Amino acid sequence: MEKDSGVSRREFLKTSGRTGVSLAALSAAGLVAPREILGANDRVRVAVCGLHNRGWDHVRYYNKVPNVQVAALCEVDDNVLRKRLADMEKLGLPKPEKTYVDVRRLLEDKGIDAISVATPNSWHSLMGIWGCQAGKDVYVEKPCSHNWWEGRQLVLAAQRYDRVVQHGTQSRYSRSAIEAVQRLRQGLIGDVYLARGLCFKRRNTIGRARIEPVPAGVNYDLWTGPAPLEPFTHNRFHYNWHWFWDFGNGDLGNQGIHQVDNARWGLGVGFPNKVSAIGGHFMFDDDQQTPNTLNCAFEFDMPGGPSKRKMIEFEVRHWITNREAEIGTPALGSHGEGHNVVGNIFYGTNGYMSMADEDVGNQYRAWLGQDVKPGPTDQRAPAFLQNVANFIDVVRSRKMEDLNAPITEAHISCTLMHLANASYRLGRTLNFDPETQQVTNDDEANRLLRDAWRGYRRPFYIPEDV
């Protein structure tokens, strides 16, 4: 097995001039060209980037898809990498041929067909863009972007290099969710005018963590990537990075982006025209920067005038909650966990419908009429495996229209999340122009949407010309 040390980047950096644009030049020169068009029976060779948490799901599920090989792993923490290799051995999964520390070295491998990105959010778009430029197809975890601008750049890169880019909002492949949306379109609950997204997850305090040396085996420069290089603390590292603006987007961009996407999908809307969000970090005195309680409102202009406008309400709540519309875990566990309420409620002129996240049931239910009589319901298995399989099918067929969670849809949903976070941080309502994808008469907001107020640390930056 070949292992990259994470230090020997000399040839790549000499050629690349330290920009993502150079990957396009390498591809044009045939140095990182993709393999020939894959046939229906050809093995698809995938590299998984980021293995600490969600990436391990990627490894296990790709191994369930016929004729797919997890050919390489990329991980900046050698402790995690060694554990995952041992886990693969215990499960009897084929070991990867190569392991990498630096994704740029991985992208030089002409034998890799696709990369699957499960890193912190701050790396998602950059790895996706570099992957497209290197001739690889990309599965990118949610959210596809750390800010609005880099999401738009990823969309452009996918189009320019004709790459398959699938988003990790797997609810779009849930049979129950698809049927629920079809029933909404068919008028089951009348004219749907309002959707609520619920992200009520019991999150305890992260406390305060002291500055300490970088753990042995961790390439902290590569882990930090595009973000500012701050002193190491365990609270800014594995998983808790979600709660720091340099790396994550709070629970709105962690769990909530699934429900934002479902709300928009079920309501049948695109970019919003007006966004407002208020909230805060309540109860706990700790290191967390992002809000643990947030109320968001999105307004959408529709053909037919003001009376036809639609709206999404979205709420993030971090502590004790009640069930709503039969969504949520029914009781507390022995350690006090539970009462997570994660899903969507759609309101129409003839009733309402709930759609639960797969973590709390993967089910939809409807109640009809003014007397709220029970209507249709359905519950089927979780959809992550099907989402991965759909990605692989399109990698082979190149029929982009068959993607169930394409990057174009992902970017719109993630823009809602970025706008709400921007409204919260700025303390004001934002008026958004869907045509220009810009906030009207608000330079400060547009700058926040472009670089998250932190800029990019070279050489890990999003290129202007993808």
Image (cartoon, rainbow, N blue to C red):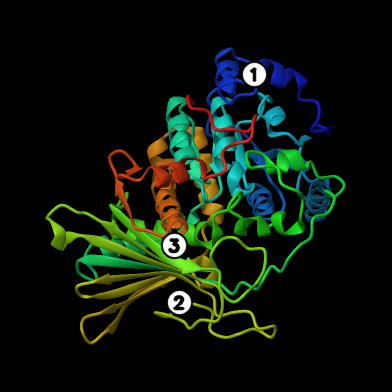
Name the quarter where the N terminus is drawn. Answer: top right
Q: Are marks 1 and 2 in contact (CB under 8 Å)?
A: no
Structural distance between the alpha carbons of marks 1 and 2: 52 Å
Q: Position of residue 279 (x, y in %)?
A: 46, 68
Q: Which mark is residue 17?
A: 1
Q: Position of residue 79 (x, y in %)?
A: 83, 49
Which label sits in the foreground, 1 or 2?
1
Q: Position of residue 374 (x, y in %)?
A: 31, 82
Structural distance between the alpha carbons of marks 2 and 3: 13 Å
Q: Are marks 1 and 3 in contact (CB under 8 Å)?
A: no
Q: Which mark is residue 405?
A: none
What residue did someone put label 3 on? 259
Q: Amino acid at mark 1?
A: Gly
Q: Residue at x 57, y 43 (%)?
A: 454
Q: Amino acid at mark 2?
A: Ile
What residue did someone put label 2 on? 327
Compared with residue 26, is residue 223 higher up or lower down, i.e. above or below? below
Q: Disc 3 on helix, strand or loop?
A: helix
Q: Amino acid at mark 3?
A: Gln
Q: Nearer the viewer, residue 307 or 82?
A: 307
